[in-house]
Protein backbone atom coordinates (compact mmCIF):
# COMPACT_ATOMS: atom_id res chain seq x y z
CA UNK A 1 0.00 0.00 0.00
CA UNK A 2 1.56 3.28 -1.07
CA UNK A 3 0.50 6.84 -0.31
CA UNK A 4 2.31 8.47 -3.17
CA UNK A 5 1.93 8.14 -6.91
CA UNK A 6 5.21 7.53 -8.71
CA UNK A 7 3.47 5.76 -11.58
CA UNK A 8 1.64 8.49 -13.46
CA UNK A 9 3.87 10.30 -15.95
CA UNK A 10 3.73 14.09 -15.64
CA UNK A 11 4.05 16.37 -18.64
CA UNK A 12 6.92 18.82 -18.04
CA UNK A 13 6.67 20.69 -21.35
CA UNK A 14 6.43 24.48 -21.03
CA UNK A 15 8.15 24.58 -17.63
CA UNK A 16 11.65 25.53 -18.86
CA UNK A 17 12.86 22.18 -17.60
CA UNK A 18 16.52 21.71 -18.52
CA UNK A 19 15.91 18.01 -19.05
CA UNK A 20 12.90 18.40 -21.37
CA UNK A 21 12.94 21.96 -22.70
CA UNK A 22 16.50 21.99 -24.05
CA UNK A 23 16.23 18.81 -26.10
CA UNK A 24 16.13 20.54 -29.46
CA UNK A 25 19.07 22.81 -28.61
CA UNK A 26 21.19 20.05 -27.13
CA UNK A 27 20.25 16.98 -29.11
CA UNK A 28 18.76 18.42 -32.29
CA UNK A 29 15.30 16.97 -31.76
CA UNK A 30 12.30 17.29 -29.45
CA UNK A 31 11.56 13.63 -30.00
CA UNK A 32 14.32 12.23 -27.83
CA UNK A 33 13.30 10.86 -24.45
CA UNK A 34 15.48 12.61 -21.86
CA UNK A 35 17.15 10.19 -19.44
CA UNK A 36 20.26 12.25 -18.91
CA UNK A 37 20.38 15.09 -16.34
CA UNK A 38 19.88 13.98 -12.73
CA UNK A 39 16.41 15.12 -11.81
CA UNK A 40 13.41 12.89 -11.31
CA UNK A 41 10.04 12.71 -13.03
CA UNK A 42 8.24 12.66 -9.67
CA UNK A 43 6.35 15.23 -7.65
CA UNK A 44 7.94 15.98 -4.27
CA UNK A 45 6.13 15.08 -1.02
CA UNK A 46 2.70 16.72 -0.66
CA UNK A 47 3.92 18.41 2.51
CA UNK A 48 6.56 20.26 0.50
CA UNK A 49 4.04 21.36 -2.13
CA UNK A 50 1.64 22.51 0.59
CA UNK A 51 4.33 24.46 2.43
CA UNK A 52 5.30 26.20 -0.82
CA UNK A 53 1.66 26.91 -1.72
CA UNK A 54 1.03 28.34 1.71
CA UNK A 55 4.06 30.59 1.37
CA UNK A 56 2.97 31.69 -2.13
CA UNK A 57 -0.45 32.58 -0.75
CA UNK A 58 1.12 35.05 1.65
CA UNK A 59 1.95 37.13 -1.43
CA UNK A 60 4.93 39.02 -0.08
CA UNK A 61 8.28 37.47 -0.96
CA UNK A 62 10.85 39.74 0.65
CA UNK A 63 14.35 38.78 1.85
CA UNK A 64 14.06 35.67 3.97
CA UNK A 65 16.56 34.38 6.51
CA UNK A 66 17.30 30.79 7.43
CA UNK A 67 15.59 30.36 10.78
CA UNK A 68 16.66 28.15 13.67
CA UNK A 69 13.77 25.93 12.66
CA UNK A 70 15.31 25.31 9.21
CA UNK A 71 18.68 24.54 10.79
CA UNK A 72 16.99 22.14 13.22
CA UNK A 73 15.25 20.35 10.35
CA UNK A 74 18.68 19.78 8.76
CA UNK A 75 20.44 18.56 11.90
CA UNK A 76 17.48 16.33 12.86
CA UNK A 77 17.44 14.80 9.36
CA UNK A 78 21.14 13.97 9.58
CA UNK A 79 20.64 12.39 12.99
CA UNK A 80 17.57 10.42 11.92
CA UNK A 81 18.69 9.21 8.50
CA UNK A 82 22.47 9.01 8.89
CA UNK A 83 23.01 8.78 12.63
CA UNK A 84 25.19 11.88 12.51
CA UNK A 85 24.95 14.33 15.37
CA UNK A 86 26.06 17.73 14.15
CA UNK A 87 26.09 20.98 16.03
CA UNK A 88 23.75 23.71 14.84
CA UNK A 89 26.69 26.10 14.48
CA UNK A 90 28.16 23.83 11.82
CA UNK A 91 25.35 24.56 9.36
CA UNK A 92 25.85 27.05 6.53
CA UNK A 93 23.65 27.52 3.49
CA UNK A 94 24.48 27.57 -0.19
CA UNK A 95 22.63 27.82 -3.48
CA UNK A 96 23.97 24.46 -4.53
CA UNK A 97 26.64 21.87 -4.05
CA UNK A 98 28.55 23.01 -7.14
CA UNK A 99 28.81 26.61 -5.83
CA UNK A 100 30.01 25.12 -2.53
CA UNK A 101 32.71 23.10 -4.29
CA UNK A 102 33.88 26.32 -5.95
CA UNK A 103 33.80 28.21 -2.64
CA UNK A 104 35.76 25.46 -0.88
CA UNK A 105 38.40 25.49 -3.61
CA UNK A 106 38.76 29.25 -3.17
CA UNK A 107 38.73 29.04 0.63
CA UNK A 108 41.20 26.21 1.17
CA UNK A 109 43.59 26.36 -1.78
CA UNK A 110 45.61 28.93 -3.73
CA UNK A 111 45.99 29.33 -7.48
CA UNK A 112 48.14 26.50 -8.83
CA UNK A 113 47.44 24.19 -5.85
CA UNK A 114 46.53 20.56 -6.40
CA UNK A 115 42.99 19.33 -5.86
CA UNK A 116 42.29 15.61 -6.14
CA UNK A 117 39.32 13.69 -7.53
CA UNK A 118 38.56 10.13 -8.57
CA UNK A 119 37.47 9.67 -12.16
CA UNK A 120 35.07 8.82 -13.64
CA UNK A 121 33.25 11.49 -11.65
CA UNK A 122 30.60 14.22 -11.90
CA UNK A 123 31.87 16.69 -14.51
CA UNK A 124 31.81 19.92 -12.44
CA UNK A 125 34.44 18.41 -10.13
CA UNK A 126 36.88 18.97 -13.00
CA UNK A 127 35.50 22.28 -14.18
CA UNK A 128 35.42 23.88 -10.72
CA UNK A 129 39.08 22.97 -10.15
CA UNK A 130 40.25 24.06 -13.59
CA UNK A 131 37.98 27.12 -13.81
CA UNK A 132 39.46 28.38 -10.56
CA UNK A 133 42.99 27.86 -11.85
CA UNK A 134 43.89 24.95 -9.62
CA UNK A 135 45.45 21.70 -10.84
CA UNK A 136 43.45 18.48 -11.15
CA UNK A 137 45.14 15.45 -9.61
CA UNK A 138 43.33 12.27 -10.53
CA UNK A 139 43.39 9.01 -8.64
CA UNK A 140 41.15 6.99 -10.96
CA UNK A 141 38.78 4.38 -9.58
CA UNK A 142 39.34 0.80 -10.66
CA UNK A 143 36.49 -1.27 -12.06
CA UNK A 144 36.83 -4.74 -10.58
CA UNK A 145 34.16 -7.44 -10.77
CA UNK A 146 31.69 -4.86 -12.08
CA UNK A 147 32.11 -2.48 -9.12
CA UNK A 148 34.37 0.49 -8.59
CA UNK A 149 37.16 0.33 -6.04
CA UNK A 150 39.70 2.77 -4.76
CA UNK A 151 43.35 2.07 -5.54
CA UNK A 152 44.71 3.13 -2.15
CA UNK A 153 48.34 2.77 -3.23
CA UNK A 154 47.75 5.27 -6.00
CA UNK A 155 45.59 7.42 -3.69
CA UNK A 156 48.49 7.75 -1.25
CA UNK A 157 51.03 8.38 -4.03
CA UNK A 158 48.86 11.23 -5.32
CA UNK A 159 48.48 12.72 -1.82
CA UNK A 160 52.27 12.68 -1.48
CA UNK A 161 52.39 15.11 -4.42
CA UNK A 162 51.06 17.75 -2.02
CA UNK A 163 47.31 17.76 -2.62
CA UNK A 164 45.51 20.44 -0.56
CA UNK A 165 41.91 19.35 -1.04
CA UNK A 166 40.26 16.07 -1.98
CA UNK A 167 36.81 16.06 -3.59
CA UNK A 168 35.05 12.93 -2.36
CA UNK A 169 31.82 11.91 -4.05
CA UNK A 170 29.81 9.73 -1.65
CA UNK A 171 27.66 8.09 -2.95
CA UNK A 172 29.67 8.20 -6.12
CA UNK A 173 28.21 9.61 -9.33
CA UNK A 174 28.28 7.99 -11.91
CA UNK A 175 29.30 4.55 -10.56
CA UNK A 176 26.80 4.45 -7.70
CA UNK A 177 29.21 3.19 -5.05
CA UNK A 178 28.30 3.90 -1.44
CA UNK A 179 31.70 3.91 0.21
CA UNK A 180 32.03 1.54 3.18
CA UNK A 181 33.28 2.38 6.65
CA UNK A 182 36.62 0.71 5.88
CA UNK A 183 37.08 2.67 2.67
CA UNK A 184 36.09 5.95 4.30
CA UNK A 185 38.42 5.34 7.25
CA UNK A 186 41.33 4.70 4.90
CA UNK A 187 40.48 7.88 2.98
CA UNK A 188 40.21 9.89 6.19
CA UNK A 189 43.41 8.46 7.70
CA UNK A 190 45.41 9.22 4.56
CA UNK A 191 43.99 12.73 4.24
CA UNK A 192 44.87 13.42 7.90
CA UNK A 193 48.36 12.00 7.38
CA UNK A 194 49.04 14.20 4.35
CA UNK A 195 47.29 17.35 5.60
CA UNK A 196 44.63 17.32 2.93
CA UNK A 197 41.16 18.76 3.49
CA UNK A 198 38.15 16.73 2.35
CA UNK A 199 35.13 18.12 0.58
CA UNK A 200 32.54 15.37 0.84
CA UNK A 201 29.77 15.78 -1.72
CA UNK A 202 26.91 13.85 -0.13
CA UNK A 203 24.11 15.09 -2.37
CA UNK A 204 23.05 11.50 -3.16
CA UNK A 205 23.30 10.36 0.49
CA UNK A 206 19.58 9.77 1.01
CA UNK A 207 19.26 7.65 -2.13
CA UNK A 208 20.87 4.43 -0.97
CA UNK A 209 19.54 0.87 -1.32
CA UNK A 210 19.65 -1.80 1.39
CA UNK A 211 21.86 -3.42 2.55
CA UNK A 212 24.13 -0.46 1.84
CA UNK A 213 24.26 2.42 4.24
CA UNK A 214 25.47 5.94 3.72
CA UNK A 215 28.10 7.03 6.22
CA UNK A 216 29.06 10.70 6.37
CA UNK A 217 32.87 10.63 6.49
CA UNK A 218 32.92 13.45 9.06
CA UNK A 219 30.86 11.29 11.43
CA UNK A 220 33.42 8.50 11.59
CA UNK A 221 36.28 10.06 13.51
CA UNK A 222 36.93 13.24 15.47
CA UNK A 223 40.00 13.89 13.27
CA UNK A 224 37.99 13.57 10.06
CA UNK A 225 35.41 16.02 11.41
CA UNK A 226 38.16 18.63 11.77
CA UNK A 227 39.22 18.48 8.11
CA UNK A 228 35.91 17.88 6.34
CA UNK A 229 33.44 20.14 4.57
CA UNK A 230 30.24 18.18 3.91
CA UNK A 231 27.78 19.26 1.24
CA UNK A 232 24.20 18.05 1.46
CA UNK A 233 20.97 19.07 -0.27
CA UNK A 234 17.30 18.15 -0.41
CA UNK A 235 17.33 18.77 -4.15
CA UNK A 236 18.27 15.28 -5.45
CA UNK A 237 16.43 13.45 -2.67
CA UNK A 238 13.12 15.29 -3.08
CA UNK A 239 13.40 16.48 -6.69
CA UNK A 240 13.72 20.16 -5.83
CA UNK A 241 16.70 21.17 -7.98
CA UNK A 242 14.89 24.25 -9.28
CA UNK A 243 14.59 25.62 -5.75
CA UNK A 244 18.40 25.84 -5.50
CA UNK A 245 18.89 25.10 -1.84
CA UNK A 246 21.65 23.21 -0.07
CA UNK A 247 23.62 23.18 3.15
CA UNK A 248 27.29 22.98 4.00
CA UNK A 249 28.24 21.32 7.27
CA UNK A 250 31.59 22.36 8.74
CA UNK A 251 32.30 21.55 12.38
CA UNK A 252 35.78 23.10 12.44
CA UNK A 253 35.20 26.75 13.32
CA UNK A 254 38.30 27.99 11.54
CA UNK A 255 37.40 26.23 8.30
CA UNK A 256 33.81 27.43 8.60
CA UNK A 257 35.02 31.03 8.88
CA UNK A 258 37.27 30.67 5.82
CA UNK A 259 34.38 29.19 3.85
CA UNK A 260 31.81 31.79 4.90
CA UNK A 261 34.31 34.60 4.18
CA UNK A 262 34.45 33.40 0.57
CA UNK A 263 30.66 33.27 0.40
CA UNK A 264 30.51 36.81 1.78
CA UNK A 265 33.03 38.05 -0.80
CA UNK A 266 30.89 36.53 -3.52
CA UNK A 267 27.91 38.45 -2.17
CA UNK A 268 26.03 35.38 -1.09
CA UNK A 269 23.66 36.31 1.70
CA UNK A 270 20.72 33.94 1.92
CA UNK A 271 18.64 31.40 0.01
CA UNK A 272 15.40 32.23 -1.71
CA UNK A 273 12.15 32.25 0.23
CA UNK A 274 11.06 29.13 -1.65
CA UNK A 275 14.40 27.36 -1.28
CA UNK A 276 14.25 27.74 2.49
CA UNK A 277 10.57 26.82 2.73
CA UNK A 278 10.96 23.75 0.51
CA UNK A 279 14.12 22.57 2.24
CA UNK A 280 12.64 22.79 5.72
CA UNK A 281 9.40 21.03 4.78
CA UNK A 282 11.28 18.26 2.93
CA UNK A 283 13.61 17.50 5.82
CA UNK A 284 10.87 17.83 8.40
CA UNK A 285 8.12 15.79 6.72
CA UNK A 286 9.78 13.85 3.89
CA UNK A 287 10.54 10.54 5.62
CA UNK A 288 7.58 8.43 4.49
CA UNK A 289 7.72 9.75 0.95
CA UNK A 290 11.43 8.98 0.74
CA UNK A 291 10.96 5.43 2.01
CA UNK A 292 8.34 4.83 -0.68
CA UNK A 293 10.47 6.49 -3.32
CA UNK A 294 13.36 4.18 -2.47
CA UNK A 295 11.12 1.14 -3.00
CA UNK A 296 10.04 2.44 -6.36
CA UNK A 297 13.59 3.27 -7.41
CA UNK A 298 14.83 -0.11 -6.26
CA UNK A 299 12.26 -1.75 -8.48
CA UNK A 300 13.32 0.52 -11.36
CA UNK A 301 16.91 -0.48 -10.78
CA UNK A 302 15.92 -4.16 -10.93
CA UNK A 303 13.81 -3.68 -14.07
CA UNK A 304 16.60 -1.78 -15.83
CA UNK A 305 19.35 -4.27 -15.02
CA UNK A 306 17.19 -7.24 -15.95
CA UNK A 307 16.19 -5.58 -19.23
CA UNK A 308 19.81 -4.93 -20.12
CA UNK A 309 20.83 -8.49 -19.24
CA UNK A 310 18.02 -10.00 -21.30
CA UNK A 311 18.17 -7.71 -24.31
CA UNK A 312 21.62 -6.21 -24.60
CA UNK A 313 24.22 -8.92 -23.98
CA UNK A 314 27.10 -6.69 -25.08
CA UNK A 315 26.26 -4.05 -22.49
CA UNK A 316 27.01 -4.51 -18.81
CA UNK A 317 25.04 -2.58 -16.19
CA UNK A 318 27.01 -1.60 -13.11
CA UNK A 319 24.53 -2.06 -10.27
CA UNK A 320 24.38 1.15 -8.25
CA UNK A 321 24.40 0.80 -4.45
CA UNK A 322 22.98 4.31 -4.29
CA UNK A 323 21.73 7.06 -6.66
CA UNK A 324 19.13 6.62 -9.42
CA UNK A 325 21.81 6.52 -12.07
CA UNK A 326 22.71 3.43 -14.04
CA UNK A 327 26.21 3.30 -15.45
CA UNK A 328 26.31 1.17 -18.55
CA UNK A 329 29.53 -0.35 -19.81
CA UNK A 330 29.32 -0.40 -23.62
CA UNK A 331 33.01 -0.95 -24.27
CA UNK A 332 32.43 -4.38 -25.79
CA UNK A 333 30.74 -2.66 -28.73
CA UNK A 334 34.04 -0.93 -29.48
CA UNK A 335 32.37 2.28 -30.55
CA UNK A 336 33.57 5.76 -29.76
CA UNK A 337 31.49 7.92 -27.40
CA UNK A 338 30.40 9.96 -30.42
CA UNK A 339 29.23 6.86 -32.24
CA UNK A 340 27.32 5.69 -29.17
CA UNK A 341 25.64 9.09 -28.84
CA UNK A 342 24.80 9.19 -32.53
CA UNK A 343 23.12 5.79 -32.28
CA UNK A 344 21.23 6.64 -29.10
CA UNK A 345 20.01 10.02 -30.32
CA UNK A 346 19.36 9.35 -34.01
CA UNK A 347 18.28 5.73 -33.97
CA UNK A 348 16.99 5.17 -30.45
CA UNK A 349 15.70 8.71 -29.86
CA UNK A 350 16.85 8.65 -26.28
CA UNK A 351 19.28 11.00 -24.50
CA UNK A 352 21.73 9.48 -22.01
CA UNK A 353 24.86 11.07 -20.59
CA UNK A 354 28.02 10.14 -22.53
CA UNK A 355 30.64 8.49 -20.32
CA UNK A 356 33.59 10.56 -21.56
CA UNK A 357 32.05 13.60 -19.79
CA UNK A 358 33.16 12.01 -16.51
CA UNK A 359 36.88 11.96 -17.26
CA UNK A 360 39.27 9.10 -17.86
CA UNK A 361 37.75 5.69 -17.35
CA UNK A 362 34.36 6.96 -18.51
CA UNK A 363 34.97 6.39 -22.22
CA UNK A 364 32.67 3.78 -23.70
CA UNK A 365 30.09 4.12 -20.93
CA UNK A 366 26.73 5.91 -20.79
CA UNK A 367 24.68 7.00 -17.78
CA UNK A 368 20.95 6.36 -17.65
CA UNK A 369 18.64 8.09 -15.18
CA UNK A 370 15.97 5.62 -14.06
CA UNK A 371 14.02 8.00 -11.77
CA UNK A 372 10.84 8.02 -13.83
CA UNK A 373 7.55 6.13 -13.99
CA UNK A 374 7.92 2.50 -14.99
CA UNK A 375 6.01 3.16 -18.23
CA UNK A 376 8.52 5.80 -19.25
CA UNK A 377 11.40 3.62 -18.06
CA UNK A 378 10.34 0.73 -20.31
CA UNK A 379 9.90 3.12 -23.22
CA UNK A 380 13.44 4.41 -22.59
CA UNK A 381 14.96 0.95 -22.24
CA UNK A 382 13.31 -0.16 -25.48
CA UNK A 383 14.76 2.91 -27.19
CA UNK A 384 18.22 1.97 -25.92
CA UNK A 385 17.65 -1.59 -27.20
CA UNK A 386 16.58 -0.24 -30.59
CA UNK A 387 19.60 2.08 -30.73
CA UNK A 388 21.96 -0.84 -30.28
CA UNK A 389 20.11 -3.32 -32.48
CA UNK A 390 21.63 -4.10 -35.87
CA UNK A 391 21.43 -1.29 -38.35
CA UNK A 392 18.93 -2.17 -41.03
C1 LIG B 1 27.64 14.45 -7.23
C2 LIG B 1 26.81 15.67 -7.53
N1 LIG B 1 27.11 16.84 -6.93
C3 LIG B 1 26.41 17.96 -7.18
C4 LIG B 1 25.34 17.95 -8.06
C5 LIG B 1 24.59 19.20 -8.34
O1 LIG B 1 24.43 19.93 -7.19
P1 LIG B 1 23.74 21.36 -7.17
O2 LIG B 1 22.60 21.32 -8.15
O3 LIG B 1 23.29 21.49 -5.75
O4 LIG B 1 24.80 22.35 -7.54
C6 LIG B 1 25.00 16.76 -8.71
C7 LIG B 1 23.91 16.74 -9.68
O5 LIG B 1 23.72 15.83 -10.43
C8 LIG B 1 25.76 15.60 -8.44
O6 LIG B 1 25.47 14.43 -9.02
Image (tube, rainbow, N blue to C red):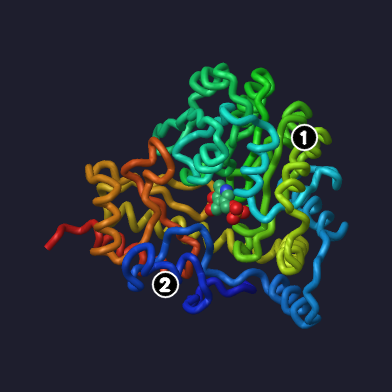
- Residue 292 visible from this viewpoint: no
Q: In this view, does 178 lie to the left or right of 82?
A: left
- The Cα atoms of the two marked residues, 1 and 2, are separated by 47 Å
Does dot 2 land on a helix, a strand or a loop?
Answer: helix
Residues at discs 1 and 2 in contact (Cβ within 8 Å): no
* Rendering coords of residue 283 (x, y %): 74, 60
Identity of the residue furthest to the right in this view: 68
Identity of the residue furthest to the left in this view: 392
Quadrant assignment, res 285: bottom right
Q: Which residue corresponds to the image point at 50% horizontal and 28% vertical from the top-left?
A: 137
Picture disc at residue 82:
none
Q: Which residue corresponds to the image point at 82% horizontal and 59% vertical from the top-left?
A: 66
Q: Which residue corresponds to the image point at 69% horizontal and 32% vertical from the top-left?
A: 108
Observer-side mark, 1 or 2, equals: 1
Height in image: 33 above or below 214? below
Query: Which quadrant is the C terminus positioned in?
Result: bottom left
Q: Mark 2 — residue?
A: 375
* Rendering coords of residue 80 (x, y %): 76, 51
Q: Pick whichever, 83 or 97, lies toward us.
A: 97
* Rendering coords of residue 300 (x, y %): 46, 61
Crowd around label 2: few <14 · some 14–19 · many ≥20 (10 Å):
few
Picture disc at residue 255:
1
* Rendering coords of residue 353 (x, y %): 40, 53
Q: In this view, does 291 lie to the left or right of 123?
A: right
Quadrant assignment, res 163: top right
Q: Which residue corresponds to the image point at 53% horizontal and 41% vertical from the top-left?
A: 131
Q: Is residue 168 left or right of residue 77?
A: left
Amino acid sequence: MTNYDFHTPINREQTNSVKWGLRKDLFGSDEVLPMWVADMEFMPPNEVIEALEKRIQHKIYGYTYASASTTNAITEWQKKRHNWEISKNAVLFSLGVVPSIAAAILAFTEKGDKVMLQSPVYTPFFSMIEGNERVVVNSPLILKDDQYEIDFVDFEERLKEGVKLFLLCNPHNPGGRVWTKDELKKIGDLCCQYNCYILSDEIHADLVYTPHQHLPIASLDQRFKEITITCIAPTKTFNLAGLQASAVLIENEQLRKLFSDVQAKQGFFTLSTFGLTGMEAAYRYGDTWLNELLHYLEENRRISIQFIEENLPDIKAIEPEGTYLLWLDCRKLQWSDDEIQERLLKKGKVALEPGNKYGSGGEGFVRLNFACSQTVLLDGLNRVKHAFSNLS
